[in-house]
Image (cartoon, rainbow, N blue to C red):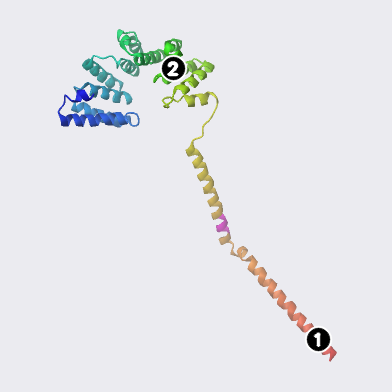
Amino acid sequence: MRQELMSLPKGLAEDVARNLVMVANLIDEDPEKAYAYSRVALRLASRVAAVREAAGFAAYATQKYSEALAEFRAARRMTGGVELWPVMADCERGMGRPERALAMAGEPEVQKLDRAGQVEMRLVAAGARRDMGQLDAAIVTLQSPELASPAVHPWTARLRYAYADALLAAERETEAREWFAKALEADKDGATDASDRLAELDGVEFVEVEELDDDADDVDAADETDETDETDEEEADPVAADTTSVDVTDESDEAVVETDAADEADEADADDKR
């Protein structure tokens, strides 16, 4: 890419490069923003193959498949390469034309792809078969030396996952579980949700942390309400709150009466003796 940008004036090349960097940084987290940056780069340097390719991937990420295909075709015309062939076929799928994607899988360009590209093409072809309702054919399409190999490559997790998903769609649940587990073993970067699919098959349910926090907040709120109610009851019934002081006063009065009676009795005894 740097070599392609060198054909541009320095200031322009820097502007284009900045936008392409933003596309790369945002395409997974915020595809729409990445797409916006790609349009800026495209407006600045539409004759640079790397720009057309970046614009294609940004459009693809936002499901603008027709636009993505046009950009990929333009980039391919400029470079003469075949690397974009699988994603071009997948754009055909996205546009509702799985039969065209399947036809592309049989073109001579596929033989020129490296191993990773051929695996990608196999995934696209299997997806096209499923789009056409040919589930068994999709399963057969995914069966390959790359699938059977115990070695782990960047594509391994996705290939095993696609195979497991197709098996599950065909109601071959035991085999599907086995391949979801194999996909999980190969998925070091969390590129798939194989762990969730396994848990689903095993009947395990996950509780979101936010739900637990909400429950705790409800309990705290209930406790605070109870405390408030108790305080309100005390304030609403001052007689009940002063019961202890009333009782103490009454007891003191009784003690005074008893003392007075005792004093009178003593005085009477003294008079009798006199």
* Neighbourhood count class around disc 2 (C-alpha, 10 Å): few under 14, some 14–19, many 20 upward: few
Q: Earlier in the sequence, mark 2 or mark 1?
A: 2
- Give the amino acid type for the residue marked by disc 1 in the picture: Ala
Quarter occupied by residue 26 = top left
Is residue 230 on the magenta stretch?
Answer: yes
Q: Which residue is mark 2?
A: 151
Q: Is residue 20 something one can see in this rendering?
A: yes
The residues colored magenta run 229-233
SS class, disc 2: loop
- Give the amino acid type for the residue marked by disc 2 in the picture: Ala
Q: Residue furthest left?
A: 9
The front one of 109 and 246 is: 109
> What distance separates the C-alpha of mark 2 from that of mark 1?
117 Å
Q: Position of residue 20 (x, y in %)?
A: 25, 28
On screen, residue 192 versus residue 96, left or right, reads right
Quarter occupied by residue 133 = top left
Q: Residue furthest front?
A: 151
Q: Residue furthest right?
A: 273
- The answer to whether 200 is drawn above or below residue 211 in the figure is above
The front one of 183 and 75 is: 183
Is residue 51 on the magenta stretch?
Answer: no
Q: Which residue is mark 1?
A: 268
Report the residue at 55% width, 24% height from top.
Answer: 202
Report the residue at 46% width, 18% height from top.
Answer: 165
Q: Is residue 40 something one can see in this rendering?
A: no
SS class, disc 1: helix
Q: Nearer the viewer, mark 2 or mark 1?
A: 2
Residue 167, disc: none
Q: Position of residue 253 (x, y in %)?
A: 69, 75
Q: Main secondary structure of the magenta part?
A: helix
